[in-house]
Image: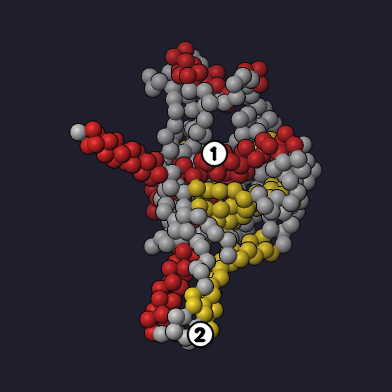
Amino acid sequence: MQCFFRLLLAGVFAFAVLTADRTKAVTVSIDYSFDSANFFGAGNPDGAAAGIQARASLEAVAGFYSTLLTDTLSTIQTPADFHSSDFDGVVTWQWQASFTNPGTGASTTLFDETIASDEYRIYVGARSLAGSTLGVGGPGGWGWSSNPSGGFTQGEINQINAISDAFSDAVSTRGEATGFANWGGVISFDNDAGTNWHFDHLTSPSAGESDFFSTAIHEFGHSLGLGTAAEWNSLVSGTSFFGTAAVSEHGGPVPLDCSGTCSGHWAEGTTSVVLGTAVSQEAAMDPTLTSGGRKRLTDLDAAALTDIGWTVVAPTFSPGDFDQDGDVDAIDLATFSTGFGVNSSGDADGDGDTDGGDFLLWQQNYTGPLSPAIASVPEPSTLLLGALASVGMLIQRRRPS
Ligand SMILES: [Zn+2]
């Protein structure tokens, strides 16, 4: 009886673990090894504390996308050399990840990296980006090869072909049958004096500041294939995007930004709602970001991720996480304060208003720093419409005129 009870417990536990894995299948990992300027540390132009904030913002964005994407991605690992048992034959394999070094802008190739199962790796760094560019991002390139020499039996040749097929599948499609999949990508952020960054994702940007969190949301989108992948381009016709989920979300073909080529961004001013909410917002993947403002991923952006082949699940959020970024913090308190007695923007208990009961739930679910900086709750910022324009997969900043 006791033994049975233990077995049952083990079964329940295993189920719980599997359930947890299903809701967080992809791990968007960040690799800082090309951050030669130490932007995400002591080399940040605003100082070491700002570097730590930048890193925390980036990790928050990676965590957000990790929660969102539930694809199963196979491991990329170069096979061990194959030696013939009967002849002198040897086969070696190699694969390469190619991308623009985010710290220098130089073409870079890495050989035989191991990418873990379900890992999507983003190499990040910073450098002085030309003109008013804030950031640049996209998926990386890849290739693989095998190098056989000497003689093999037919059985060994069959084995070798099977190894090559599996390796090719892992490198080119991560073992997925359809849709975009890759080893990962690269993002570089501007680190020259021309950009006045707001790094802290726990507080809102002030007028005149470029929000790092919003820029990261946008560039991660490009690194995951939005506006950049062949699967995206195949759904572009004329001046619109025709992905089924995006069309459904938008209520028709989604107009694209055609200030350059009609491809990488939604048309300027395309609106949707913050993912999983009814809060209207300009889409993350349109070409501009108002200085002093913050943008989150919208339903439309997420629909496009689905259209290019990602499996997307809407995340669930704690009561009090009004901005639905996975934590309950001072920004959520600011949302509550704005909505208190006015509307339901700070409605944590689902009764349709923003009142004391909602504040209690915010407090109970609080996950921010131990001493919430009530005094620093952001004030409604004046509308400084310094437009951020973008070309291709860049976000650019124009000075307010
Ligand atoms: Zn862009």
Would you say 238 lies left or right of 379 here?
left
Q: Position of residue 366 (x, y in %)?
A: 52, 23
Residue at 57% in and 38% down: 60
Residue 185 position by quadrant:
bottom right
Residue at 66% in and 49% down: 32
Find disc 2 in the rendering and name its residue.
88
Would residue 271 be visible to someone looking at this image?
no
Indicate the secondary structure of the residue bearing disc 2. Answer: loop
Q: Is residue 361 above or below residue 222?
A: above
Nearest to viewer (mark 2 / mark 1): 2
Q: Which amino acid, mark 1?
A: Arg
Q: Position of residue 138 (x, y in %)?
A: 59, 56
Give residue 296's mark.
1
Residue at 62% in and 38% down: 57
Q: Quadrant of the C terminus?
A: top right
Would residue 9 be visible to someone looking at this image?
yes
Q: Are marks 2 and 1 in contact (CB under 8 Å)?
A: no
Distance from disc 2 to disc 1, alpha carbons, whole Å, reads 58 Å
Indicate the secondary structure of the residue bearing disc 1. Answer: loop
Would you say 12 lies left or right of 234 here?
left
Would you say 261 lies left or right of 160 here?
right
Q: Earlier in the sequence, mark 2 or mark 1?
A: 2
Q: Is residue 289 above or below residue 172?
A: above
Would you say 241 lies left or right of 196 here?
left
Front one among 312 and 81? 81
Residue at 53% in and 26% down: 367
